[in-house]
Structure formats: C-alpha cells, structure tokens
Image (cartoon, helix red, strand yellow):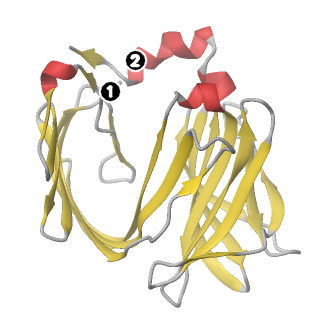
C-alpha cells in the first residue's frame, strides 16, 4: 500500500509514492496509517498527515491536507457488467486546505474525492480509460468517465452531481481528441458540440498515465477541468514494469 503525493507548481514540484508492506500498516475505525503518514477522519474532515520522501529526487514531502466535504455522493457505480470494478464519487465537491512545511506552501480551494475498488487488478479489468471532472457555477460537479474494458467492450457515463449529492445522468457531450503527450499517450475528452477543449497544462506525463488541466465547455458553461488518461496495456509491458520502482520504491 502507498500514499501518493503529487505537487505541481513553481514553488515546489514533488512526487512521492513509496510502497509499504503489511508491517508498516495500521488501521482502526477512523485512521489508516501507511508508514509515517496517516489518513484519518476528524469529525467531518478528512485529514491527511504526510511524511514522505520523494522519488526520483529524494526530497522531503511534509505537510497536511484537510478535505472538508461540501457534497456527499449518494451512489456508487459499476464500471463493468459483472460489477468487479466499482467507482464511488464520495465527496464530489469539497473544500481543500493545504499546508506544507517541505516544500513551504499553503493554499485553499475546491477539490474532489472519489474511490475505486474491485475484485481484480486494474490491468485485468481495463484496457484504458479517460476521466475528467469540473465544478459548475451552481455547485454541481460534472464527471465524465469512459474507456474500454480488457475484453474491448466500451463503457462510459456523463454525470452531473448536484449539491444534494444526487447523480443525474446526462447526454455525453461530443468527443474531442487532445494532443498526445510527450510519451505519445492518447488523450480524449468531451465538450459541447462545436467547442474545442484546450490543454492548459500537462501536470503528469508518464508512459501509461497523464494528468492534465483543461479549458472546456460543458452543457453551456465554460469550465476548468482536471483530466486523466490511463492505458493499462502499456502499464502491463515489461519496459514499464522495469521503470516503476524508480517512481514507486518499495519498503517492506
């Protein structure tokens, strides 16, 4: 198990994701400890205490993130017909307060919290997926989730999660092919017909995964969106598996 921390920006760009064995894990009803870091509920606030070491550059990553849900999701969704993979938008709109001592940075803003869980590994279940979310002016959250299962079957949904947590199924906007990443990873998003989404920044660019900031238009509203592309066929190749320990070191 690991706690992944990714910080982007001029004041401090850090990445940490150390895999730890069972001897480094502990949990009770409200707290999960992963090595020196912990995730815990403090009343209605999810507190993430971070004490990690970065990779590839071994820089300290120390701080705290507080996630206060403003909206609680009311549904979970099967991503495959057999229900082996489940996605749950736990708190699609949240207040996020960030305070780090290393690197030194503080900010507050609007965030998102979800969870995926399943009965098999991601590479067994999926060939690829495209996901994005954006906050709307009325307090709703737009979420697009689509891709291919491992057997080649398409899946997809467009949701508008309202301020009371209800998920309204929407018509999927028109597809927009985004420029490939430096690793030649395909990226696809959605936007209102006739509108071309624009890449504002590519935060994460790896052989099998990208995380991107977009400007797009959804259901008549101009929005800023966070987007990810995942290619599990690439992930499962020998070359990528050989490279993973450089970004994901292991401590038993």
Residue at 70% x, 61% y is 157
- Residue at image x 28%, y 26%? 18
Judge left or right: residue 39 versus residue 241. Answer: left
Residue 34: numbered disc: none
Answer yes or no: is residue 135 visible.
Answer: yes
Q: In which quadrant of the rendered view does residue 55 lie?
A: top left
Relative vertical location of residue 61 with respect to residue 166 in this rendering, above or below? above
- The image shows residue 96, relative to residue 25, as above or below, that is below
Residue 207 appears in view = no
Quadrant that contains the C terminus:
top left
User: Counting other residues with Cα less than 10 Å from the Cα at mark 1, is it few (<14), some (14-19), or many (20 or more)?
Assistant: some
Q: Are marks 2 and 1 in contact (CB under 8 Å)?
A: yes
User: Which sits earlier in the primary sequence, circle 2 or circle 1?
Assistant: 1
Q: Residue at x 52, y 52 (%)?
A: 87
Taking depth in this image into account, of 133 and 61 the one nearest to the observer is 133
Label 1: which secondary element: loop
Along the line of sight, the residue nearer the viewer: 221 or 153: 153
Q: Which is more toward the observer, 20 or 43?
A: 43
Q: Quadrant of the N terminus?
A: top left
Element type at marker 2? helix
Q: Position of residue 89 (x, y in %)?
A: 47, 62
Q: Which residue is mark 2?
A: 246
Q: Position of residue 128 (x, y in %)?
A: 69, 37
Q: Position of residue 178 (x, y in %)?
A: 76, 52
């Amino acid at each position: 198990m690991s706690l992944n921390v990714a910080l982007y920006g001029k004041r401090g760009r850090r990445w940490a994701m150390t895999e730890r064995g069972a001897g480094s894990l502990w949990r009770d009803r409200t707290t999960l400890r992963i090595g020196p870091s912990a995730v815990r509920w403090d009343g209605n606030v999810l507190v993430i205490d971070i004490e990690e070491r970065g990779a590839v550059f071994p820089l300290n990553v120390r701080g705290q993130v507080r996630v206060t849900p403003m909206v609680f999701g009311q549904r979970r969704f099967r991503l495959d017909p057999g229900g082996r993979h489940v996605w749950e938008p736990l708190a699609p709109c949240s207040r996020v307060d960030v305070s780090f001592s290393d690197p030194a940075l503080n900010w507050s803003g609007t965030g998102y919290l979800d969870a995926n869980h399943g009965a098999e590994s991601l590479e067994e279940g999926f060939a690829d997926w495209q996901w994005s979310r954006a906050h709307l002016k009325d307090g709703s959250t737009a979420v697009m989730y689509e891709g291919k299962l491992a057997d080649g079957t398409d899946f997809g949904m467009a949701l508008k999660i309202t301020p009371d947590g209800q998920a309204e199924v929407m018509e999927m906007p028109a597809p927009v092919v985004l420029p490939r990443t430096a690793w030649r990873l395909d990226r696809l998003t959605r936007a209102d017909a006739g509108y071309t989404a624009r890449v504002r920044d590519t935060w994460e660019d790896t052989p099998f995964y990208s995380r991107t900031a977009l400007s797009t238009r959804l259901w008549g509203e101009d929005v800023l969106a966070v987007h990810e592309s995942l290619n599990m066929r690439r992930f499962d190749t020998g070359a990528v598996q050989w490279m993973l320990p450089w970004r994901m070191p292991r401590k038993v």
